[in-house]
Amino acid sequence: MKKMRLVTALLCTVMTAALLSGCGGSSSAKTFTVGFDAEFPPYGYMGDDGEYTGFDLELAEEVCNRNGWTLVKQPIDWDAKDAELNSGTIDCIWNGFTMNGRESQYTFTEPYVDNSQVVIVAEGSGIGSLADLEGKNVGVQKDSSALAALESDSSILASTFASLTQYGDYNTAFLDLKQGVLDAICIDIGVAQYLISQGDGGYVILDEQLATEQYAVGFKLGNTELRDQVQQTLNEMAADGTIDRIAQNYADFGIPESLCIGD
């Protein structure tokens, strides 16, 4: 009987150890799901190889590698981002996400990129300033920072447009600009530089800016524990030069010059 009890106890011990090993413990089993707009280059988009990539997704990948997490890249409809975050479908919004004016709605990391809202027009359009947009057809992304700038209490610019059309993504808006449906697009400067670089020329960014802002990683309001862990890792990446190195992959879009983390 004693031998049987001993054997039973040993089997239980082995099975328990196997179960724990199969679960991978705590940190190794953790997934980190990033919600992003898949058509928001250079921060998040589908590369030529059919895989999602971008500056923000590269940062997220490195954060996961250093914490032993598995990164899940979750494309979302930008105007549904709050529902995705509040339901727990995603752990954070990390995709050129403006923190200014949203501080009471999310728990943010410290900013890592300084960003500007600008206007793209066709060369030779006769539009050289924001004042020249009067009577013009203008496009902007739904629930974007550019739209917020146009709808702010201090702005009367949008009231001078012939129309302001909201798009689900900037790629579609840029196609309409090419086809002459739009006269201009209000957009984040990094995305503007990317879209222009992918074409054959013929488009410029106005010197005047709509607004300036900062990007940060947004978590569900009150989720300070996960935010703090990500922030600590980002600080380490800034200190050892990793963020600067990743930013160089997007030098054509002004990312290195826009960094503000570690200043």
Image (spheres, rainbow, N blue to C red):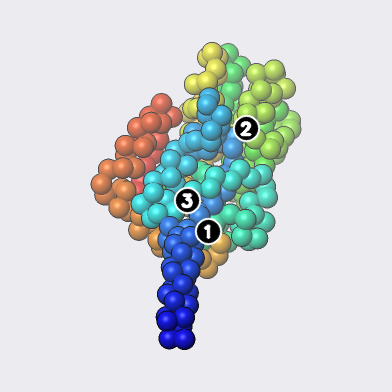
10 Å neighbourhood of mark 1: few (<14), some, or many (≥20)? many
10 Å neighbourhood of mark 2: few (<14), some, or many (≥20)? many
In primary-sequence order, the first of circles 3 and 2 is 3
In the rendered image, is residue 204 in sight? no
Residue 178 locus on image (x, y percent): 65, 18
**Direction from residue 87 to residue 208 in the image, left or right:** left
Residue 234 locus on image (x, y percent): 36, 52
In primary-sequence order, the first of circles 3 and 1 is 3
Amino acid tagged 3 = Thr
Q: Which mark is residue 119?
A: none
10 Å neighbourhood of mark 3: few (<14), some, or many (≥20)? some
Residue in front for this viewpoint, 178 or 244: 244
For marks 3 and 2, give the one nearer the viewer.
3
Residue in front for this viewpoint, 189 or 151: 189
Amino acid tagged 2 = Tyr
Callout 1: SS: strand
Please tell me whether residue 170 is drawn above or below residue 86 in the rendered image.
above
Residue that badge 2 annotates: 170
Residue 192 locus on image (x, y percent): 53, 29
The single residue placed furthest to the left in the displayed view is 240
Residue that badge 3 annotates: 70
Which quadrant would residue 78 be assigned to in this image? top right
In the rendered image, is residue 123 in sight? yes
Residue that badge 1 annotates: 219
For marks 3 and 1, give the one nearer the viewer.
3
Residue in front for this viewpoint, 43 or 192: 43
